[in-house]
Image (spheres, grey):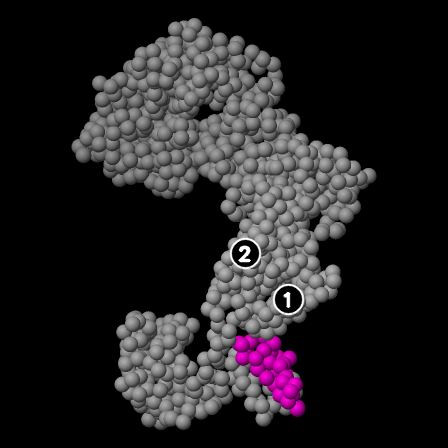
Amino acid sequence: MKEIMLYRGCTIPVRLPAYEAATIAVLGKLGVKVVEMDDANCCGAQYVESVSRMAFAAMSGRILALAEKESKDILALCGACSGSLKINKHFLDTDEKARKEVNELLSEEGLKYTGKTRVRHLLQVLNEDIGFEAIEKAIKKSYKGLKLAAHYGCHVTRPYEIVQVDDPENPTIIDRLIEIAGAEAVDYLGKTRCCGGPLLAMDESLATHIGQDKIRNAIAAGAQGMVTACVFCDIQLTQVQFGEDTDSSKMIPVIPIVQFLGPALGIKEDVLGIELNKTNPDIILSALQGAK
Amino acid sequence: MTEAETPRIGVFICHCGHNIAGVVDVVAVAKMAESLPHVVFSTDDMFMCADAGQQLIRDKVEEHGLNRVVVASCSPRMHEPTFRGVVEEAGLNRYLFEQTNLREHVSWCHMREPEAATEKAIDLVQMSVARAAKLESLPVKSVKVTPRTLVVGGGITGLRAALDIANRGFDVVLVDKEPKLGGHVAKWTHMFTGDRSGSEVVGPLIKEAKAHSRIEILTNSSVVEFDGYIGNFEATIENRKDKSRSKFDIGTVIVAIGFDAFKPYGYYGYGESPDVVTLAELQEMPPRDRLLKPSDGKPAGKIAFIGCVGSREPGKKGHEHCSRHCCPAVAKAASDLKDRLDEVLILYKSIRTYGRGHEELHRLARSKHVIYSRFPVDEDPVIEVVDGKIKMGWTDVYADEKLQFEPDILVLASAMVARSDIDETTKLFGLTRSRDGFFNPEHIKLAPLTTHTAGVMIAGSAQAPKNASESVVDGSGAAAKAVGIMAQGEVEIESTISRVISELCSSCHTCVTACPYGAIEMDESKDPPIAFVTEAKCHGCGTCAAACPSSAIIMLHSTDDQIMTMVQAYLCAPPDTIGST
Amino acid sequence: MSNETHTPSSDFAKEIASIPGGEVINKCIQCGICTASCVVAYVDDQYRPRRLIQKILIGKRDEVLNSDQPWLCMTCRMCEERCQEGVSPAEIFHAVRVLAAKEGHIPKVFQNTIEKVLCDGWMLADAYTDFNEDEREDLGLNPALAWNDTFTKKVKKKYLAGEESA
């Protein structure tokens, strides 16, 4: 079985462990074994990134070196981590001076980054390493009569020249997976817009406004739920629906791609951790038919 | 002059594929035409303009001894020359041909009313047939063309035109009122794109022109008299210094007198300090390692440019247009100078770096940290000269900031305007100008370098504001037009012109005043003087005929008789033809 | 708009251009497509990436470095995706942040989070409770997260020693 090393990032363990569990289960079913990374550190996204280029490169660089030590590629679930690791990989691959400087720091632990390790976002693993054909074959039950909106996340898809995950203006991987599982993928206004998450630190109300706007647009297009591919986006789009001024009757379930695919692949709900979801996924799960 | 013979008219109704036949019942129209007076043959055909259709005309002319041909088809603007040619080949005078427009005037505009359209088609054909019976052959005349071009203006445009014509084997008389050739370009230190100076660019042209055996150069001179018509002009050129005059026989003329660089007194402190200069004046400064202030000769450290000075001012005649050349010129000047200066600012309303290599100049300027600052359309920068210092204040639209600056030199990209003496040139050559002051071309899109005076071309910045490269294109284009006329050795003139019936002329001179082309004058050799048409100048517009109170002027091919018969054919159609009301 | 009049200077733009991320700031032609695409500009009518870049280009150093605006960018990079000239306002604002932080202008929340991350090795050490541990076990995941904080302390010492203040 192909193996890939998981970089979970800061948020998953505390806010969304189900995403990790579901990923391991789904990828395992599809022939990819997820192994743990030991002794990791924060990738430096957003915060360290804003104050020092080299500090940022060093933090992400160490993660790359840890994976390289085990000769494994990195699986990133959080969009921001995926973006950080890819951008820093690009930086260290192309800037010899920076690479030397980081490796000097790492050498104290016996680590070194030479460029062998690749950074893969979950969507890349599903699309490129596993492939739609294999996923389609593995589908055991289909969804029926279900309309879903896909949210990709900014750091997952941009800047395209470096991350190379999906078309930045018209991404389709999640949409295709939705369709393979039998549901209908709806297009909606502002599909490629940010969820607002990164703005939470500076201005929570603006960030909430942005997230709520996204949900509103999806509902207006007829979507009954939203499928995500970044842990930060998932948390943001979930919590903006719980504000004081929100209408709970207008809530839609927000669900990571792996929790959506899992049941269709015949994986039990408790393995996927769906009972921990804050938004109610019933409307999605009840659309799951018998054998396809 | 009337034809003694009886008209024998052939009528050909064209289907034009589905274009006419899809709406008009062409078969019925052709059938109806058979019964019209003087029609000896009538038919319909798929495409009259195709080889088969043309052959049909030739065959039927011979077979039926036709002496008039009516083709009811598309607009004469499409194929009148084609059919006239066919008729001529068949042995008839080309003016014995009449074309009826059943396409643009019937099937294309009455698409949803086929019955009414067919009725209209019938009416039109009746009218054409009636007119055809009244048509007369007209002589086809040509005039010889003198193989010599007069090029007025020895700047880059005139030089290019002169060389092109001379290299093609024709003579050129190149006139310029300045002592030296090269116009504005010769005086400029920085051209764009590329890094050569103006004199480096135009120098080789001047050298080549001076050495060319076919080019006669008269500097310090201007054209003082000009008369004649296409192929046969006579120009008198006077030397402004010694007042000596020379006369030349000229076949074609190219007017390339260039532009004036507007001196913007009253704008932005111009005239209040020697350090406020126009872009043209900046270009004329001798090249040095350091840029020096005109006021005290000290090196400048920071400069500013302001765009659109005296251009794009709605409501101000002669200053409403965009002067086109300035945005790239300013970008180039700014990048060239930034290397030697601490700060360069460009204040703009728009950035119109439209042409080849221009956007690259814009980017180059920015990459050198030239600061571009946009000011509002309705709030010009305020410039005050205080104690010899230039104080600028304006609002930067994009930063939303009030800014101030004290440049050592302020450069105003002022307008390209028509030359101050353009009035004289306009009258001399029978040209017209538009509201922006520049010469009018014959057709703004399809004939930009010719004018309504046949044989006289316009080129360069006199035709419209443009940069040097574009002016050269004009020069070559106008040269090609001139050569096109001269290479044939002769040129056909209009046969459909006006003619004076001398016995009826009452010497009132009304026609002379009315003619827009100066084609009619009084023949003083007669007593009393009789109006006389110079056929080569006449465009057949009909103004003289309409103005004449004595009905002494007729329009060939549009005589009163020919027109009235069409009206009668429509209103008083013979009772036994279809379509009469 | 401030009421004082500013004298334009290209020095600040040159300074930004020397910081990674700010290199191509002079390619900006002020077309506005970044602002039109910006989600923050959509919800906050004071936030205008184009305006901020022009302020840099004309040299309003103090205003820009003291402003909150560069910190409001979500780094979603839609502006970068759409810019026709190859400029990334997101990256330019990164460069501004680096310079601002160096001079002690850094929003508290950023300052605090950076401290935390470099000290603990990751961002949410304080928030990881027994509850979360149990959750992980129930899901069949390893409750021991094994974050490394030695390296991040090294990084702090080497690159961010001067950031203690403010």
Residue that numbered label 1 is attached to: B426
Q: Nearer the viewer, residue B158 or A236?
A: B158
Residue that numbered label 2 is attached to: B163
Q: Is residue C58 left or right of residue A164?
A: right
Q: Chain of mark 1?
A: B
Q: Mark 2, residues whose alpha carbon is within 10 Å: few (<14), some, or many (≥20)? A: many
In the image, which residues are magenta?
Answer: B510-539
Q: Position of residue B56 (x, y in %)?
A: 28, 78
Q: Which tag is nearer the camera, tag 2 or tag 1?
A: 2
Q: Position of residue B11 (x, y in %)?
A: 33, 83
Q: Chain of mark 2?
A: B
What is the three-letter code of the residue carrying label 2?
Answer: Leu
Q: Is residue B23 above or below residue A131?
A: below
Q: Nearer the viewer, residue A128 or A187?
A: A128
Would residue B516 be counted in the magenta stretch? yes
Q: Secondary structure at mark 1?
A: helix
Q: Secondary structure at mark 2?
A: helix
Would residue B422 be counted in the magenta stretch? no
Q: Residue at x 61, y 37 (%)?
A: B336
Q: Position of residue B417 (x, y in %)?
A: 65, 56
Q: Are marks 2 and 1 on the same chain?
A: yes
Q: Nearer the viewer, residue B524 or A13?
A: B524
Q: Mark 1, residues whose alpha carbon is within 10 Å: few (<14), some, or many (≥20)? A: some
Q: Position of residue A47 (x, y in %)?
A: 50, 20
Q: Is residue B51 above or below residue B320?
A: below
Q: Residue at x 49, y 32 (%)?
A: C88
